[in-house]
Image (cartoon, rainbow, N blue to C red):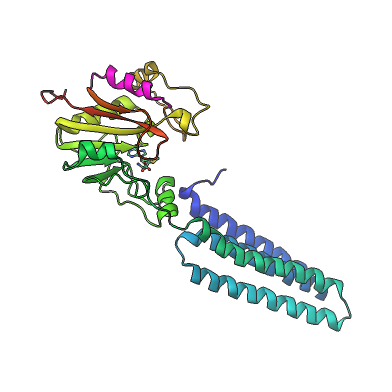
Amino acid sequence: MRLRGPAHRKQRYLVGAAALALIVLALVRLGASSPRMAEITLLGAGVLVAYALGYFLQRKARRVSLRRRLRVAGLGAVVVAGLLLALAWNARRRGEVAFPLVGGGLAACAAVHLLGQALARRRRSRPRRPARESALAHKYLDGLRGVEIGGSIHNPFGLNTLNADYTASTDTVFKQAEIEITGKALPVDIVASGDELPLGTESVDFVVSSHVLEHLPDPIKALREWYRVVRPGGYVFMIVPHKERTFDRDRPRTALAELIHRHETGECPDTKEHCSVWITEDVVELVRHLNYPIVEVQDVDDKVGNGFTVVIQKDARAETP
Ligand SMILES: C[S@@+](CC[C@H](N)C(=O)[O-])C[C@H]1O[C@@H](n2cnc3c(N)ncnc32)[C@H](O)[C@@H]1O
């Protein structure tokens, strides 16, 4: 059984807590067998708790302030140090040296680990500046009202848009990444799949998207939907990752024939990776296949720069099928 991803967080904590309880129980039983074993048990339990607490603090780093995490870590470190002193004092009474030294070393490591964990995530998750806006998007879309599909706070367009996404939950990898990068996430105004928008035909001036089309299993359906909701003379503006400039570089390109097959049969890839992998010419070919007028193509997008941009302008006299 795999317990990966945000959806399984609760189960992961439960499994972790149960495992910890079992280990502590085993140690307590072991400790009851002799006073010496009781000391070892105490030390083991202390180190274990320090490591579990450190892991927990690191996981919570995004939501809990550094001061609070340091307070908890400090308290844990004091408990571990107290344990060490008690053990050393006890061992000295028996005239032993090695035991408190080894135990002390372990306990000190656990205390340092605890403080380190409390600090670690903070450094990595310090808010970064959002990506630059696209001059090309401003050129076509300023002064208009539209919809962004799958918007994010760290890669904003700075346009007048509502944000449509398939979920309003902040538990998705995408939203967690936003929170990780900037400390917050862009709210979702319209909860809907990007290829089934609850919007009237020709009801918006534009649809804009960045790094979204490749996530949709049937891009033809999505493009038809975006074209449908745009008014005549309006725009579909999309930035799509270029396979050679992303982690998709070793994957084969997705052919137009495959996209047509997906659209006609409903057979779509069931994958956690990008559903489609393209270079600029592939998406231009797809748009031409749909007979949508392209007004501009930017082979390296002027936003993050790892994709390309295709701008469609709906024919002013077009009738949406
Ligand atoms: C890789 S992120 C891109 C975020 C942002 N546009 C950017 O360029 O940084 C993909 C976005 O598309 C959204 N998304 C994925 N599948 C979707 C779907 N079927 N319908 C609507 N949005 C979807 C995700 O929730 C996420 O917000």
- Quarter of the picture containing the N terminus is top right
Residue 137: x and y, percent?
26, 38
Question: In this orientation, which residue lies closer to the viewer: 287 or 52?
Answer: 287
Q: Quadrant of residue 233?
A: top left
Q: Is residue 248 above or below residue 36?
A: above
Residue 269: x and y, percent?
43, 27
Residue 10: x and y, percent?
49, 55
Q: Residue furthest bottom?
A: 93
Q: Which quarter is ligand 1 in? A: top left
Classify residue 150 as left or right of residue 39.
Answer: left
Q: Residue at x 70, y 66 (%)?
A: 109
Q: Is residue 138 above or below residue 86?
A: above
Question: In this orientation, which residue lies closer to the viewer: 200 or 252?
Answer: 252
- Quarter of the picture containing the C terminus is top left
Classify residue 311 as left or right of residue 307.
Answer: left
Q: Quadrant of residue 147?
A: top left
Q: Residue at x 49, y 53 (%)?
A: 9
Q: Which residues are magenta?
A: 277-292
Q: Residue at x 56, y 43 (%)?
A: 2
Classify residue 69 as left or right of residue 104.
Answer: left
In reply to whether residue 58 is colored magenta, the answer given is no
In reply to whether residue 289 is colored magenta, the answer given is yes
Classify residue 93 as left or right of residue 85.
Answer: right
